[in-house]
Image (cartoon, grey):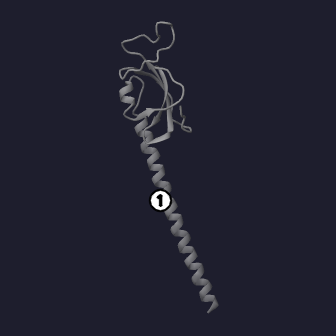
Amino acid sequence: MRMSTAVLMALCLMINTTSVAEELSLVTREHTEWVAESLREIETVRVGMTRAELLRVFSTEGGLSTGLSRTYVYSECPYIKVDVEFEPVGRSAQDTEGRVTLIESDEDLIRQISKPYLDWSAAD
């Protein structure tokens, strides 16, 4: 009797362990798929696109910036970021005193965009 109880308990433990492993595998697969989909969407933003087009995928991040250089966060996860430099359209890159402009326009063109990276959120 003791032997059958021990075998039954071992069998239950194996089934439970297998079930937990399968659940973890499913969660891992779902996370991996989400990251892959996110990267595909992020990669649609390219040099030459406008700030308005960038803002369909990203939103602005707090912290230091100018009108021509800013960090953006992925709209679905604030820890996924890119640094972007712009070429101004229809105005000078500097103000009347020679400082980099703080003015931003939806028509500004992306001159450079970094690879996506992970970082904690910055707050002003």
Query: In front here: 11 or 31?
Result: 31
**Spot occupied by residue 57 in the image (x, y as percentages of width and height):** 39, 35
Q: Which residue is mark 1?
A: 26
* Residue 16 location, quadrant: bottom right
Q: Is residue 19 above or below residue 7?
A: above
**Spot occupied by residue 66 in the image (x, y as percentages of width and height):** 49, 20
Extreme bottom residue here? 1
Query: In front here: 104 or 47?
Result: 104
Q: Is residue 91 left or right of residue 18?
A: left
Q: Is residue 75 above or below residue 7?
A: above
Q: Is residue 96 above or below residue 9?
A: above
Extreme front residue here? 124
Q: Residue at x 50, y 55 (%)?
A: 28
Q: Residue at x 53, y 66 (%)?
A: 20
**Spot occupied by residue 86 in the image (x, y as percentages of width and height):** 44, 20
Q: Is residue 80 above or below residue 109?
A: below
**Spot occupied by residue 87 in the image (x, y as percentages of width and height):** 43, 17
Could you say whether the residue bearing mark 1 is in a helix, strand or loop?
helix
Q: Residue at x 45, y 12 (%)?
A: 93
Quarter of the image with the N terminus in it: bottom right
| Label 1 neighbour load within 10 Å: few <14, some 14-19, many 20+ | few
Q: Please count the marks in the image.
A: 1
Give the residue type that dot 1 points to: Leu
